[in-house]
Amino acid sequence: MKHNHHEKASGNLLFVFILNLFFNIIVIIGSIITNSMAIFADCLHDMTDTISIGISWILEKISTKDRNDIYSYGYERFSILGAILTSIFVIIISIIVIFEAINRLFNLVTPDAGGMLIVAIVGILFKGISAYRLFSGVTFNEKAILLHLLGDIFEWVAILIISLILIFVDLSFLDPFVSIFISIWLIYNLAKTLINSLDIILQKAPKNININEFKKLILDIEGVVSIEDFHIWSLDGIESIFTLKITVNNDDYDLIRSKINKLSSNYNIVDSTIEILKI
């Protein structure tokens, strides 16, 4: 049961990978035919989509493996590794797109508005289906890919609007301008995902757990005198682990341990190690 969310994530990512692989071909052809910078930008994004989703799917699949003597805590962090790689990859590509779009602003080219409109409609359809599939995902890996897909949807909606405008008015600067705006949005949001993922890798205490409150509840248990050692971290941003060393003034170790484990379950802690010392 512990790996259910990773197994579901793996299936979701495989579906999205196949869908984006097919769509990638459409976008490449569309960018050539329309001569649109916005579609070219999304062409680059789509290529990174396909690569990063493929990497994420492989790492998510690995994360479902059971723990062993080599990986004693299991493989859950491979999912976080996927989120980190995806975030870095997309941020780099987004920076490249910004530079290309700025260059296009100084060398404006009128794109094929009709072709842009058709490709935009197809883009919204494909990306919408992919995003819907990942919308309920709980792993950081899925969230990183979802953010990228949402960025793509926003860009395709913007391209659709621009294409309609260009059909009636020649405002070619809108095409690269939208690419810059969407790329900045992606960088901002994926930077947050990257920071959160790195926090997990660096074993920062989970944000959803009030450490001071948790310690106080432990100290309030009858018989507990003091907390000598306390460590808590998350494997994948969903489930947490903690180790504890406490001193007590009675011999009812089983009851104390049971109460601490009950408290732990309220914080989605799936694994705990409790060492009890009597004063």
Image: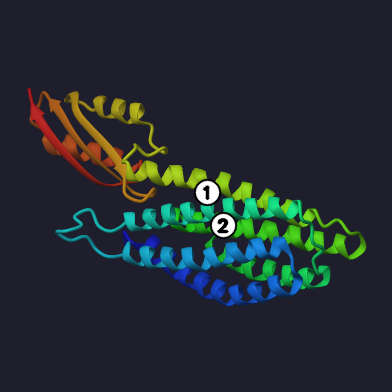
- Residue 152 appears left or right of 267: right
SS at mark 2? helix
In the foreground, 258 or 243: 243
Q: Earlier in the sequence, mark 1 or mark 2?
A: 2
Report x, y in % for residue 244.
Answer: 20, 35
Quarter of the rendering containing residue 276: top left
The residue that mark 1 highlights is 190
Report x, y in % for residue 208.
Answer: 42, 39
> From this viewpoint, is residue 139 visible?
no
Which amino acid type is marked by label 2? Answer: His
* Figure check: 75 above or below 221: below
> From this viewpoint, is residue 7 visible?
yes
User: How far, Cα to Cα, is label 1 from label 2?
Assistant: 8 Å
Tell me which residue sits at (38%, 41%) in the image: 199
Q: Quadrant of the N terminus?
A: bottom left
In the foreground, 187 or 106: 106
> Do tag 1 and tag 2 residues touch (Cβ < 8 Å)?
yes
The residue that mark 2 highlights is 148
Q: Residues within 10 Å of mark 2 (few under 14, many from 20)?
A: many
In the foreground, 78 or 33: 33
Which amino acid type is marked by label 1? Answer: Leu
Report x, y in % for residue 95.
Answer: 58, 50
Q: Residues within 10 Å of mark 1 (few under 14, many from 20)?
A: many
SS at mark 1? helix
Tell me which residue sits at (62%, 55%) in the image: 97
